[in-house]
Structure formats: structure tokens, C-alpha cells
Image (tube, grey):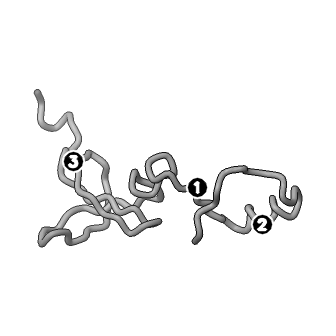
Amino acid sequence: MKAEGHPEYREVVFHDLSCDFKFVTRSTISTREKTEFNGKEYPLVKIEVSAESHPFYTGKHKIVDTAGRVEKFRQKFGSVGSKTAVAAG
């Protein structure tokens, strides 16, 4: 296998910003940011959702309001909408 034909496969820290959860895995993703994790420096990839924060894995329904879209929906349609329980906060 030619070394120059493949991307670098290395350990990377993924940081779930919604719940401040970090985990190390191997990836070929390129990033400019670095972070220290467990005393070692790794490339950093920031993500919005991981298994720690995704409603399917947590069992909690959480609405992420981006630019007031949820509020606009509630004003337009009132109380008609999702029947799932909404997590606080």
C-alpha cells in the first residue's frame, strides 16, 4: 500500500458542545484546532450532537432553538405540535 495515497489516520478528540462531553477515537478528519485530553494533545473536532446528547440514546426530547424558529412555530400553530415531553433546559 502506498503511504502517500491515503489520509493520515490518527487519534482525535470529538467535543459534543451541547453537553460538554469529550471522547477520543481514530479518524482521518482534518482540523486546525488542538486540545489536551488526559494529559496528551490531540486534534479537536467540535460537534453538535453525539450519543451523549441525542434524544434517541438519552430518552429525552430537547428542542434546540436556532434564531427563534421554535418560538415562531409556537406563535403560528399555538399548542398544536409535538406530543413528546420536552426536557427542561
Say how many tags the image has.
3
Could you tell me how far apart the alpha carbons at marks 1 and 2 are, in whole angstroms?
A: 16 Å
Q: Secondary structure at mark 3?
A: strand
Mark 1 or 2: the one toward you: 1
Mark number for residue 26?
3
Answer with the quarter of the image where residue 86 lies: bottom right
| Left-right relation of 20 to 38 | right
Q: Earlier in the sequence, mark 2 or mark 3?
A: 3
Q: Earlier in the sequence, mark 1 or mark 2?
A: 1
Q: Which residue is mark 1?
A: 61
Q: Secondary structure at mark 1?
A: loop
- Percent position (x, y) of residue 32? 31, 63
Mark 1 and 2 residues: CB-CB less than 8 Å, in contact? no
- Percent position (x, y) of residue 36? 20, 72
- Percent position (x, y) of residue 7? 23, 41
Q: Residue at x 43, y 67 (%)?
A: 19
Mark 2 and 3 residues: CB-CB less than 8 Å, in contact? no
Q: Earlier in the sequence, mark 3 or mark 1?
A: 3
Q: Residue at x 49, y 46 (%)?
A: 56
| Left-right relation of 73 to 26 | right
Q: Quadrant of the C terminus?
A: bottom right
Q: Which residue is mark 2?
A: 71
Q: Secondary structure at mark 2?
A: helix
